[in-house]
Image: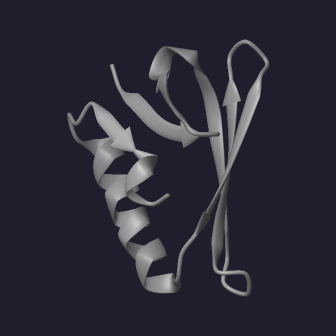
């Protein structure tokens, strides 16, 4: 089972795939930021805004795609926070 590691308000959260509804991503070139809205199965939501340039965003997307097609267990948003 996959797990997402998120730093939020000075703490580290782990979101297991079984708790996850979906994740909406939106990258803004103008703002240089990636907004992620995380919807959990219990109806709660989390929102992350990661500041990154286009090159870093390309690395994020490559890492994101690799995570979803591989047998990797953890995706660490902290790498980009």
Picture residue at 62% right of the left edge, 41% below the top: 23
State which quarter of the image contains the N terminus: top left
Question: Relative to the observer, which residue lies in front, 26 or 53?
Answer: 53
Which percent across, then down, holds residue 17?
47, 22
Furthest-left residue in view?
Answer: 71
Horizontal side of 61 relative to 20 (left or right) equals left
Furthest-right residue in view?
Answer: 43
Picture residue at 50% right of the left edge, 39% below the top: 6
Question: Relative to the observer, which residue lies in front, 72 or 9?
Answer: 9
Question: Could you tell me how many numbered marks the image carries?
Answer: 0
Horizontal side of 73 relative to 18 (left or right) equals left
Query: Quarter-wise, where is residue 55 in the image?
Result: bottom left
Horizontal side of 47 relative to 54 (left or right) equals right
Which percent across, then down, holds residue 46?
71, 36
Horizontal side of 28 relative to 53 (left or right) equals right
Query: Quarter-wise, where is residue 25 in the image?
Result: bottom right
Which percent across, then down, holds residue 7?
52, 41
Q: Is residue 16 above or below residue 31?
A: above
Q: Is residue 67 above or below residue 25?
A: above
Question: Relative to the observer, which residue lies in front, 38 or 7?
Answer: 7
Picture residue at 35% right of the left edge, 26% below the top: 2
């Amino acid at each position: 089972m996959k797990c997402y590691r998120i730093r939020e308000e000075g703490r580290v959260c782990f979101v297991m795939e079984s708790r996850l509804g979906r994740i909406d991503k939106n990258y803004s070139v103008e703002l240089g930021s990636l907004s992620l809205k995380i919807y959990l199965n219990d109806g709660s939501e989390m929102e992350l805004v990661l500041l990154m340039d286009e090159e870093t965003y390309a690395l994020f997307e490559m890492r994101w795609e690799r995570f979803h097609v591989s047998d990797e267990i953890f995706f660490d948003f902290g790498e980009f926070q």
